[in-house]
Amino acid sequence: MKLRSTSKSTGYGVIAVVGGAIMDLVYETERMPRLDESVDALSLAYKPGGKGSNTAIAIYRGQRNKPTPPTGPAGSVASPAKQGSSSSGAGVKKQEDVRVYLNTAVGNDHFGKELMRSLQQNGVDTSGIETLEGSQTGTCSVFVERFSRNGRDIGFPGANTDWQPGYKDSVECLAGGNKPDLIVVHLENDRKVVESILATANRHGVDTILNPSPVYALLEPTYKTVTHLLLNEVEVEDLADVPKELATEEAMLKACEHFMERGVKHVVITLGERGAYYATAGAHGLVEAVDVDEEDMKDSTGAGDTFVGTYALECVQQKRGRSPWDIRKAVEKGCKAAAKTLQQLGAQDAIPWADEV
């Protein structure tokens, strides 16, 4: 099976991402508070995040080696260049043939400005991000236990849910006037908007990735418009009414088949430390996770988004190379990149560059 390529005229690949731009407030604690208990945090850090933003940055970084600060006279450090730009030492192109556009909204406030700056520094085209008066930029409070590194979060979507695409029956409006090779959709925006975008992409022959997070129920016909469904065990439980713990490969395959019977072509279930399970027509299997030493574990916040971005990039690079679709290769790359994010605090800071995977 070959994937559809839609951006021949541009000379480069195009991925449009629809998802959140959110400021993460990351609290490190000794432990999670019990019911009706208050505890003091050990530290607080403000980290740019949002599933859409993290995914877009993972797509960009997956094509470039990590930049090194340029040096001035006598070895002094010069003013920093844009991350990943060709003037930033080792941050030269590895194979930057895919451009990434993020579509969402922020408020006209400090957090919104910081998120826009971070995205632009990381090579993401922000022309599809609206700044809305009267709306607050989305935020997420992330709580991470010091020793177990387990985390919980509470998000406020803010302006993300007020975003609307520029045109109702257009995919080009999501990618700076280009027809995208792939549209990646999270559920941080309004449900009706998300379902409309998936339906529009399907009508225009554009492949889609749906990551149903934060999870909520979708209309049954929506699944027929999804090319790739990437989700975790909790999301499987909510959407497919199966046990949260997929203990056997037989159970994993059954869960995948639930979505494929509804029209999804390719399904990937991420399983944390167990890796990821994939299923498509004629192929299915388990890809084991990359081992990470317990003492190196810092934060799992951006692991899933990094997996999605890496998988998306591999989809487009395979179709641009006119290769038969190799889903296992995409899942393997996603697992490797996601493992790297576990070793650093904060979602976007931890997203690896091409030469780090």
Image: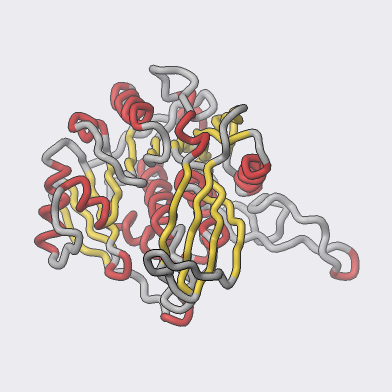
- Residue at 45 percent across and 48 percent down: it is 155
**Relative vertical location of residue 286 with respect to residue 220 in this rendering, above or below:** below
Question: Position of 312 compared to 326: left or right?
Answer: right
Q: How is the image coloured?
A: secondary structure
In which quadrant will I find the N terminus? top left
| Front one among 281 and 234 | 234
Determine whether, in the image, residue 180 is placed left or right of residue 278. right
Q: Position of residue 268 (x, y in %)?
A: 26, 52
- In the picture shown, does residue 83 fall above or below 207? below
**Going by the image, does 37 lie left or right of 112?**
left
Examine the image and state in which quarter residue 320 appears: top left
Residue drawn at x 58%, y 72% as measured from the top left: 42
**How many callouts does the rendering have?**
0
- Counting from the top left corner in percent of width and height, residue 194 is at 36, 31
Q: Position of residue 75 (x, y in %)?
A: 85, 70
Is residue 95 in view? no
- Picture residue at 46% right of the left edge, 25% below the top: 164
Q: Residue furthest front?
A: 36
Q: Residue at 22% of width from left, 35% of height from top?
A: 223
Q: Nearer the viewer, residue 296 or 291?
A: 296
Kindly give the residue lying farthest to the right in the view shown. Answer: 73
- Horizontal relation, residue 129 to residue 265: left or right: right
Residue 225: image location, x then y, percent: 25, 31
Q: Is residue 25 visible?
A: yes
